[in-house]
Amino acid sequence: MDCEIRDEGGVAIVALTGDVDLETSPRVRGALLDCVGAKRSVLVDMSGVSYIDSSGVASLVEAYQTARKSNTKFGLVQVSEAAMRVLELARLDRVFAIHSTLADGLKDVGG
Amino acid sequence: MTAPEVGERIVELRVQSRADRLRVVRAVVAEAARSAGASAPCVRDMVIAVDEACQNVIRHAYGGRPDGEIILQISRLDDRLIFDLVDFAAPVDASVIRPRDVTEVRPGGLGTHFINECMDEAVFRPPPAGAGNRLWMTKRIE
């Protein structure tokens, strides 16, 4: 699993690639919490996520809640089909801001 | 209680209770399901459920101990696949394992909900002699 962070106009783009599971989700959790802890808006690019389990989803929820508390924006972009199924199972597709393109996400978070 | 149905054995997998073994479990479940003729969405749901069940064993039954053993047997009975998951941890109280309310937005506690949503049946059954827990899951091949 790869977790790459880059900056686009002050917005942290966290690109996840591969399987986000019990083994790899602690790394994702750490990266996301670092970004939202720095009061940066965050967009998680999930186009390359081949699998995500409940521990990966928990990392997203924790980052989302931390961002809300600090009044920063948090969203998901280009969610893969495999990841979307899991978000739907968790009913989180109605909770997270989900954007079909990075441009839409950047527009929403003001990047 | 009647004996669980057996069906035609497709594969038996023995792995240690380690997070890095879940990749192997997912690959075996996906291949077994595909070879039984399951559609891509059906394969995906079987993989999700078995992964979460193994994760529960690793995290809760074995408490993160990496040297526990997990045995997964996958069998076919008519139009269903049976996933029989056995561990050797201390028995868990199955009566307290319930899916949480998913309308609450909070991290964690989704594994049992995923299992119930993705499988047609998921029940704890009496484990074989010497084992700790046995989770029996079935899903119709679609």
Image: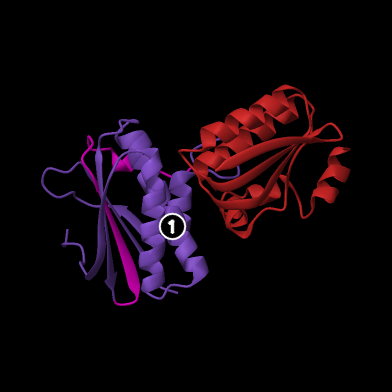
Chain colours: A red, B purple
Q: From this view, report whether residue B34 is shown above or below residue A75.
A: below
Give how far across and how far down residue B59 sits, in percent.
37, 35
Q: Which residues are magenta?
A: B78-100
**Residue A61 in view in this figure:** yes
Residue at x 70%, y 46% (from the top left corner): A45
Q: Secondary structure at mark 1?
A: helix
On the rendered image, what quadrant is the C terminus of chain B found in?
Answer: bottom left
Specify whether residue B97 is in view. no
Q: Position of residue B5 (x, y in %)?
A: 21, 67
Q: For the point 36% across and 59% down, which residue is it?
A: B28
Question: Would you say residue A78 sits in the magenta stretch?
Answer: no
Magenta-drawn stretch contains B85: yes
The residue type indicated by label 1 comes to Val
Residue B32: x percent and y percent? 35, 66
Residue B141: quadrant of the picture:
bottom left
Q: Is residue B46 above or below residue A19?
A: below
How crowded pointer 1 is (Cα within 10 Å; few <14, some 14-19, many 20+) is rated as many
Kindly identify which residue carries mark 1.
B47
Q: Nearer the viewer, residue A26 or A72?
A: A26
Residue B45's place in the image compared with A21, above or below, is: below
Question: Furthest residue to the left?
Answer: B129
Instruction: Choose top left, top right, bottom left or bottom right for residue A31.
Output: top right
A76 left or right of B112 in image: right
Image point (70%, 35%), residue name: A5
Percent x, y of residue A49: 60, 50
Query: Looking at the rendering, which quadrant does residue A108 occupy?
Result: top right
Total marks drawn?
1
- The chain letter under disc 1 is B
Report the quarter where the N terminus of chain B lies: bottom left
